[in-house]
Image (tube, rainbow, N blue to C red):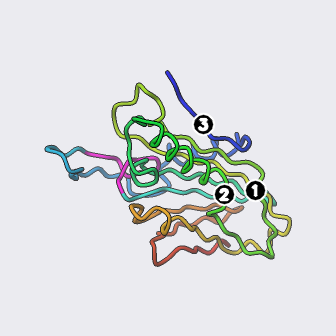
Amino acid sequence: MKKAVVALGVSGALVAGWYAFSHFGHFGHDHAHSHDHGHNHSHSHDHGAGGHAHGVGQMSLFVDNTDVSLFFHAPAGDVIGFEHYPRDEEERAHAGAALTFLASGEWMQFPQRAECTLQSGTADSDQLDEANEGHADVTVDLMFTCERPRHLTQATVQLFETYSALERIDAHWIRGNNTDTAELTPAITTFRIR
């Protein structure tokens, strides 16, 4: 089994937080429906946290004092452009470039006054596993430190221009006792954090 991970560091707390979200349904729409992927049959996908719905990504943001953990999940076809194992060097390079960009965190913007810097970032796709024959997803874990967290009042996601197949991101954030959700689209890329 071959699998590649682009890593700029490690973020174990984020994985534990995402595990809690994915198992307790915080996105609030754990329904299944059928849709056509351009082939002769349709199949059902769970649209809860971590579900595979073309055009839809999920993002969770956890703020703990100066630490900000972010988890992003989307179908590989929406971000990389295909879900199959890379067939040649060009597809491998394309997938690698997308994962490197996602792991860089450059697409996530916080207010400059919050003085946030990326501490670690990883991006992975199960499409890089030769044994994967089904739908493939991309997962991204980012860890930021914000020196002035009281100024962390919003976040802007800059992925829609780069990845036009991505139509919506269901975002969820937690900060202390506050929590909320936001639906991000190409027209609405910023959400408030209280």
User: At 47% from the left edge and 69% from the top edge, which residue is drawn?
Assistant: 183
Q: State which tag comes first along the sequence, 1 or 2.
A: 2
Q: Note whether 53 is above or below 92 in the view shown.
A: below
User: At 59% from the left edge and 53% from the top edge, which residue is drawn?
Assistant: 102
The reply to whether dot 2 and dot 3 touch (C-beta < 8 Å) is: no
The CA span between labels 3 and 1 is 18 Å
Badge 1 amino acid: Leu
The residue at which mark 3 appears reads as 5
Residue 139 quadrant: top right
The reply to whether dot 1 and dot 2 touch (C-beta < 8 Å) is: yes
Compare residues 178 and 65 and report the one nearer the observer. 65
| Segment tinted magenta in the rendering | 44-54
The residue at which mark 2 appears reads as 105
The CA span between labels 1 and 2 is 7 Å
The residue at which mark 1 appears reads as 118
Q: Is residue 133 left or right of residue 192?
A: left
Residue 110 quadrant: bottom right
x then y, percent, for residue 11: 71, 43
Badge 3 amino acid: Val
x then y, percent, for residue 163: 46, 61
Q: Note whether 92 is above or below 118 in the view shown.
A: above
